[in-house]
Amino acid sequence: MYGGSLSGTVVFPGVDQDACTAFVDGGHNFRTGVGELPKIVLVDRGSCYFTKKVWDAQQAGASAVIVADDKDEPLITMDAPEDDPSANDYLASITIPSALITKELGDQLKKAIANKQRVQIVLDWSEAIAHPDERVEYEFWTNSNDECGQKCDVQVNFVQDFKAAAQTLEQGQYTLFTPHYITWYCPDAYRDSLQCQLQCINKGRYCAPDPEQDFEEGYDGRDVVVENLRQLCVFKEATAAKKPWVWWDYVSDFQIRCSMWDGNYDAACAEQVITSLGLDVKNVRNCVGDPNADAENAVLAAEQKAQVGDGNVRGDVTILPTIVINNRQYRGNLEKQSVLKAICSGFKETTEPAVCLGADVQTNECLDNNGGCWQDKKHNLTACKDTFRGRVCQCPVVNGVLFSGDGYTHCEAAGVGRCSVNNGGCWSMQDPHSNQLFTACKEGVNHCVCPPGFKGDGINCQDIDECAADSLVCKCPECNCRNTIGSFECTCSSGKLYMRDHDTCIDASAGGSSSRKVGVVVTSVVVGSLVLAAAAGYLIYKYRLRQYMDSEIRAIMAQYMPLDSTQEQAGAQLIEREGAV
């Protein structure tokens, strides 16, 4: 239930308080009645496994279970036990949330219930995973072993089912994924023992349990350690090739083609898969190194260091499989929908990728009454935005134009280009006769204003009837008024002409005579101006031509005789006369 919450009433049973006996046999009924809050059953820790307690409460109708610790100690992870196969059967069928709480909190709840107080609590998973940025970092602590029973089967199925979603998240750079593998070391005093030799590599430094718990047949723990190391090296090689998501292809393909059951769990089969994915087999071999060498392996040494928590949030990783999201340990079933929901809760609101908004992860609140947000059905516009945690009423951006408003009751286009989207939310109409468009939207103005010839608030505009009795136009005795869209037409009787500026009618002959006189005067002025301009231009041309010729003649004469000041004056006079001629 990552990203959600559950509010309910706490119920502490009078008998079978450790929930190790089926409640249905004791006559308990925790089912939620009509109009009631869900019942959250409080049970004591002890006597049986967590899975049995939760299963029994679920069968009796509980909506959730909280288990009170029986001693003051740091809380642990509730998990199905390795040595009880029946617990896995319960785990696969549990559909309600459960949590372990401290003894102190449990005692407080029991005391309040004993005092006949109604205890209501809220289980909130919305902040179960930190989401500091727009990218989620998560780790998957896994194992290449496929013969460990139901847990291995669940893990194999999870990898197959989750691969597509994981690769979509990684290729879109929404997540940073890292696979990890748990190993431990064999104490120095036992490194020469058969158990260490069969379960460890590198002289007892890195070990894994025997798959069949039988040292005499089948595969050994050292085979598992080597394949775990190979899968880490595949991830390292894929990351170097800038396609780390190929790890999911390798692991899923290896599970199908190289299973222990088929006897293909070996290096030859693994390298066929590596080659088929286009990765460098030689680099992977070098990364694996020599399992028999009495030396550390850098990759596995880093894994053992990562396995130990930093002492803050996560703690040590000891359970397989384990998923750590944003440095917080995932709590829940190992199946696609639950894990994807937990990862998606690690994104900031409204930044979730599309894979987080699929129908198999969450419902689209915008489909129900548009989420209660503003919408313009006519133009298919809405302020409802579906997110992983619910809907957000936020005015949209359409074709680069930002809408502003509260998102609930009002949104309107604002800024540059607003008139191009739904006419800025303003009134508009088109004259069916002239096809002229009239609009109350004007670029650069963030409110609607009716155009000339119309009246209204800009959202609704009406044509002004200029021919109405209270109008001030077309009112002369000879005037005949006809209203048009956005304007009017005024004509005069008896062949007269209408002068709009003076709102009067004049004789057509008088108007024609005046027009002709004005035309003659204007023509005369224009012709006279052209003649004067031509004359002035000719004089300027002659003056410049004379100046040019003077300079040319003086240059020629200077080549044949020296000119003193007197001669220069005489030459200048000669040039002037010749120029005049």
Image (tube, rainbow, N blue to C red):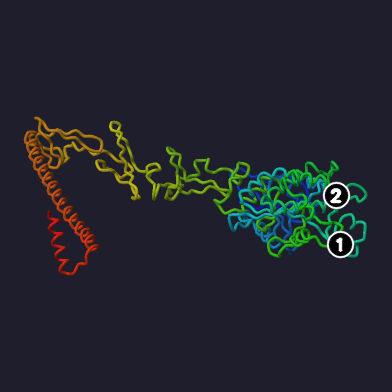
Q: Given the current orientation, which residue lies at the most extreme top position?
A: 494
Q: Position of residue 140 (x, y in %)?
A: 72, 53
The residue wearing badge 1 is 294
Q: Is residue 123 left or right of residue 454?
A: right
Seen in the picture, residue 93 relative to 48 is either above or below; the reply is above
Asked which secondary structure carries label 2, the reply is loop
Which of discs 2 and 1 lies nearer the camera? The answer is: 1
Few, some or many C-alpha atoms within 10 Å of disc 2 (few <14, some 14-19, many ≥20)?
many
Q: Is residue 331 left or right of residue 406?
A: right
Few, some or many C-alpha atoms within 10 Å of disc 1 (few <14, some 14-19, many ≥20)?
few
The residue wearing badge 2 is 211
In this view of the protein, which residue sits in the foreground, 141 or 120? Answer: 141
Tell me the amino acid under the disc marked 1: Asp
Whether residue 41 is visible: no
Whether residue 230 is visible: yes
Q: Given the current orientation, which residue lies at the most extreme front position?
A: 560
Q: Residue at x 88, y 65 (%)?
A: 188
Q: Position of residue 59 (x, y in %)?
A: 72, 44
